[in-house]
């Protein structure tokens, strides 16, 4: 049990005044809002409370952690990471509930089958046989549904864990357009579009992400600094984007899952006043879509 703590009334008033003076609106993100919506849907699903209370408690704890981070006004990337984990746990609770409900259907179907066998003793043999066969088919269908739900839950858990690790290895950052992986200028030849060995290795890692998540697509965007002519910069940025695309194609990624766009010196990541800043602007950004969702246009 927690020990009680007593505070004087003046102390409480001072604390309340301090909190009121320092607090501001909690941080929130679209992903956190989506996760809250998923949570409400799971909470209103009677199958979840009946068949997956433990998984739902874990999902609740994960969402509480995300909400706490938002209340503390942690940075949006941390809030989104916690919200993403909560979203996956909510989905797992839904899948487990579906699986166990299907297993309950199997048990009920078995009872029905036994009753049909009893009826066969008092009814015509052909009618009893037909109904027993129907019950058997229902039981087999329910069993297949349970197995599919179980496999889906395992797959969702494995993909979520694998994707999180892969994106961390690629130093991906969460943006309003999706997860963004940045390839710096050092991953290309000087003023050239060919990938270096390190750049090709990054492309292989990205290909692994796409193979494990076939419902996702990528948009590859090339950028340069402001040095040189605009036509040259535009052409170089497009060729670098296409070089990354070609590396993904060589790894077996379908062409219809990859789009490219060169912007030249547009949309700089930093000023062009120093060599270090110009190097930041010479880059390729790879935007990874959400599941079965189009990537928003650049603003």
Image (cartoon, rainbow, N blue to C red):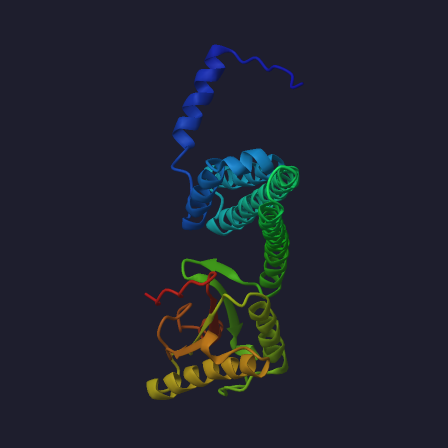
Asked if residue 171 is positioned above or below residue 13 in the image, the reply reads: below
Specify the quadrant of the image occupied by residue 238: bottom left
Mark count: 0
Q: Is residue 29 left or right of residue 69?
A: left
Identify the residue shown where x is 56% and y is 40%.
Answer: 59
Q: Position of residue 38 (x, y in %)?
A: 46, 44
Identify the residue shown where x is 50% and y is 80%.
Answer: 245
Q: Quadrant of the N terminus?
A: top right
- Residue farthest along the front direction in this orientation: 124
Q: Nearer the viewer, residue 236 or 158?
A: 158
Q: Quadrant of the C terminus?
A: bottom left
Q: Position of residue 199 (x, y in %)?
A: 58, 78
Q: Nearer the viewer, residue 150 or 210?
A: 150
Q: Is residue 173 left or right of residue 176?
A: right
Asked if residue 85 is positioned above or below residue 40 in the image, the reply reads: below
Q: Nearer the viewer, residue 207 or 213?
A: 213
Q: Position of residue 36 (x, y in %)?
A: 45, 41
Specify the quadrant of the image occupied by residue 93: top right
Q: Nearer the viewer, residue 183 or 35?
A: 35
Residue 275 visible, this angle: no
Residue 292 visible, this angle: yes
Q: Position of residue 231 (x, y in %)?
A: 34, 87
Asked if residue 152 is positioned above or below residue 256 in the image, the reply reads: above
């Amino acid at each position: 049990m927690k020990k009680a703590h007593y505070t004087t009334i003046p102390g409480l008033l001072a604390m309340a005044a301090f909190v009121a003076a320092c607090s501001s609106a909690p941080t929130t993100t679209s992903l956190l809002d989506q996760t809250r919506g998923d949570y409400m849907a799971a909470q209103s699903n009677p199958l979840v409370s009946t068949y997956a209370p433990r998984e739902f408690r874990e999902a609740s704890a994960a969402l509480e952690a995300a909400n706490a981070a938002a209340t503390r006004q942690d940075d949006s990337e941390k809030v989104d990471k916690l919200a993403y984990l909560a979203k996956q746990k909510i989905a797992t609770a839904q899948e487990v509930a579906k699986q166990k409900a299907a297993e309950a259907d199997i048990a009920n179907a078995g009872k029905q089958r036994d009753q049909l066998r009893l009826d066969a003793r008092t009814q015509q043999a052909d009618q009893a046989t037909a109904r027993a066969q129907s019950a058997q088919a229902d039981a087999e269908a329910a069993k297949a549904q349970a197995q599919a739900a179980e496999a889906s839950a395992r797959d969702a858990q494995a993909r979520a864990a694998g994707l999180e690790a892969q994106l961390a290895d690629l130093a991906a950052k969460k943006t309003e357009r999706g997860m963004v992986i940045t390839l710096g200028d050092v991953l290309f030849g000087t003023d050239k579009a060919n990938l270096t060995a390190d750049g090709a290795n990054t492309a292989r890692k990205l290909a692994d992400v796409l193979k494990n998540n076939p419902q996702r697509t990528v948009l590859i965007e090339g950028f340069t600094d402001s040095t040189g002519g605009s036509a040259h910069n535009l052409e170089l940025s497009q060729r670098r984007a296409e070089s990354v695309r070609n590396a993904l194609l060589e790894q077996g990624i379908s062409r219809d899952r990859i789009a490219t766009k060169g912007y030249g010196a547009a949309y700089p990541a930093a000023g062009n006043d120093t060599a270090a800043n110009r190097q930041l602007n010479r880059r390729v950004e790879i935007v990874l879509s959400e599941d079965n969702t189009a990537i928003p246009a650049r603003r």
